[in-house]
Image (cartoon, helix red, strand yellow):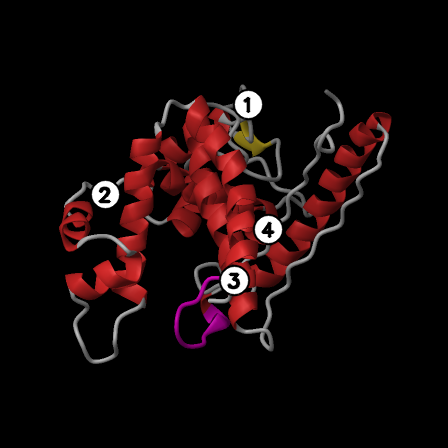
Amino acid sequence: MTTQITQVLSAAIVTLLRPLVRILLRNGVPFGAFSDLAKRVYVDVATEEFDIPGRKQSKSRVAILTGLSRKEVLRVKRLPPPDDQGAAERYNRAARVLGGWIRDRRYADKYGDPAVLPLEGEGATFAELVKRYSGDAPARAILDELIRVGAVERLETGQVRPVERAYVPKGGEADKIAIMGTDVSDLVATIDHNIRLPDQTFFQRKVSYDNLPEEALPDLRMQSAGRAQMLLEALDRLMSQQDRDVNPEAGGTGRKRAGVGIYYFEGDMEGEGE
């Protein structure tokens, strides 16, 4: 690796870590815990992705690749896994159900809008919607989650209807932090892909300005959210036509994942607003 690449990469890592460390410190995660997590990822990636074809990856080679001692590699491998699939699983299941409700015409009213659904019974029901889009998840648990985040409301008749077009956790930080893990990982993976394969790049763009008046921000926030939601819903309809869970007739081979993420950001320029 050249000195220039090392310098650019180091600067990029510092920029990337700053908002992450802010979250870690706010939630009482000390450097030692972060260090062990970073070591574990180094060891896992070196073991799984940097092996020599046809040969089992050894602890000695992992130690060389990561710069850790063989003893430290063994210690890190023995650490309990930090994965908490609960929040991510809730997010994925609830988002799939709400997305199906919004786009699947089987759950639409005569005007094409998401229909008010009975919980159970014949025909289009909430329980049948959950079974179609979330497998064996209990319908009651999915309903409670969607009501909790304000995406669905229960009517006096006992029926339910969506009041939001997207699943966005509004409660505790745990669910939002789980989304941070998946969404930031996807963005960094896209950047990595584009670095490695410049002739096969994935779409990665942003628009930003650095001399905006504070008074302009509320309207920019609102318009960005509205236009982004319209684009995502259009892309959702396009992708769902090829997804074999939603459309069993799609056919094809293999099993791939793909998606598009949009985010809005704002803040003070460095040295401003102090």
Where residue 155 is drawn, which disc sits there? Answer: 1
Which one is nearer the viewer's eye here, 187 or 244? 187
Q: Residues within 10 Å of mark 2 (few under 14, many from 20)?
A: few
Q: Residues within 10 Å of mark 3 (few under 14, many from 20)?
A: few
1 and 4 marks in contact (CB < 8 Å): no
Q: Which residue is mark 3?
A: 3
Alpha carbon of mark 3 to alpha carbon of mark 1: how far?
Answer: 64 Å
Q: Magenta span covers which residues?
A: 249-257
Alpha carbon of mark 3 to alpha carbon of mark 2: how far?
Answer: 35 Å
Amino acid residing under circle 3:
Thr
Q: Residues within 10 Å of mark 4 (few under 14, many from 20)?
A: few
SS under mark 3? helix
2 and 1 marks in contact (CB < 8 Å): no
Which tag, 2 or 1, sits closer to the chain's start? 2
Residue ID at (43%, 25%): 25
In the picture, measured across the screen, residue 169 lies left or right of residue 28, that is right
Q: Is residue 2 magenta?
A: no
SS under mark 4? loop
Q: Which residue is mark 4?
A: 261
Quadrant of the image occupied by residue 259: bottom right
Where residue 81 is drawn, which disc sits there? Answer: 2
